[in-house]
Amino acid sequence: MNELLEELALNAWPGVRQVHFDHWVLRLSGNHTRRANSVNFLGPSTLPLDFKIDFCEEAYSRFNTSPVFKFAGLYDSSTIDSNLANRGYQIEGNAMVMTHDLDQLRAVPSVDYRVESDLSAAWFDLAAAMLEIDPGRLPYFEKILSNIVPDHGFASVWHDGKPAAIGLAVVERGWIGLFDIVTSTQFRRMGLGNQLVLNMMKWGKERGATAAYLQVVETNTPAVSLYSKIGYTPLYRYWYRAKTG
Ligand SMILES: CC(C)(COP(=O)(O)OP(=O)(O)OC[C@H]1O[C@@H](n2cnc3c(N)ncnc32)[C@H](O)[C@@H]1OP(=O)(O)O)[C@@H](O)C(=O)NCCC(=O)NCCS
């Protein structure tokens, strides 16, 4: 299951630049999100590990950055993990993948819920503001969102005629993935995040999804509480190793 959900998540959140190297995929996207700027292990290595890590360091250095390696419990993880630890890479970004069977979807509140299949300037500007994205990263955010290939929707919930919460949904192979869920600060703790997520799940179900997944940082208490309350349960953990200094 981990392999499938990792693959779906890579498609849902495409890297702006990608290099395939001996079953690893290196993604570079102007440092906007670790997901789009990390090395992912998609199969067993056939080449020496030190050679591969050197290759990654050299590739990222050409963009004035250093690689971030993602661990989702797949392929050679423990060997790579100890090698990177010896090189001074630290663990960061502990997160989990949570899932929800859409047969168990409970009553969905009827609210002003909107979804667009194409990225509009209005939705993009809302997302950039609500997610407080650094202006230098906006071109990469725009490219990531514009390059999504599977069926997807840019969702929002409106309150009193104002956009209050937004999210991105991507449907592939019977799964709906939820990304960039955020409620505007002035509308938090009013049930709007809950309404948004439930309506996105319903939208996914209507488009053929039978299950939902999302990724959440373990220390993000509001988000973990929201998803748990809806009925999401943890499936597996993942984390990154990066040079933080
Ligand atoms: C997480 C987030 C989307 C929740 O949105 P929200 O509209 O405030 O959530 P809701 O009002 O619908 O809350 C529903 C439930 O979530 C939980 N919850 C929400 N905020 C919480 C908080 N600050 N602390 C603890 N639990 C919280 C509660 O269980 C709440 O139910 P309750 O109010 O009956 O106790 C919002 O805090 C946010 O935008 N955070 C920043 C972006 C982010 O981290 N997104 C998630 C990325 S995975």
Image (tube, grey):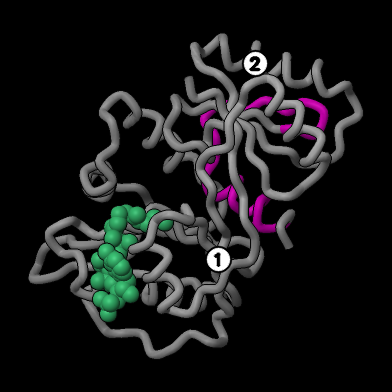
Give the number of the disc on residue 98.
1
Asked whether, in this view, residue 150 is left or right of residue 165, the answer is: right
Q: Is residue 70 visible?
A: yes
Tell me the residue at 49%/11% (across/down).
64
Which of the two discs, 2 and 1, labels the residue nearer the N terminus?
2
Give the number of the disc on residue 169.
none
Tell me the residue at 56%/57% (across/down).
96
Q: Is residue 193 visible?
A: no
Asked whether, in this view, residue 180 is left or right of residue 113, the answer is: right
Secondary structure of residue under mark 2: helix
Q: Which amino acid does label 1 sit on?
A: Met
Q: Mark 2 points at which residue?
A: 57
Q: Looking at this rendering, what residue extends furthest in the left direction? A: 160
Magenta stretch? 4-24
Q: Which of 153 and 167 is in front in this view?
A: 167
Picture coordinates of residue 194, whole percent (x, y): 32, 74
Tell me the residue at 45%/74% (across/down).
228
Picture coordinates of residue 235, whole percent (x, y): 63, 66
Q: In which quarter of the image is residue 157?
A: bottom left
- Asked whether mark 2 and ligand 1 are closer than 8 Å, the reply comes as no
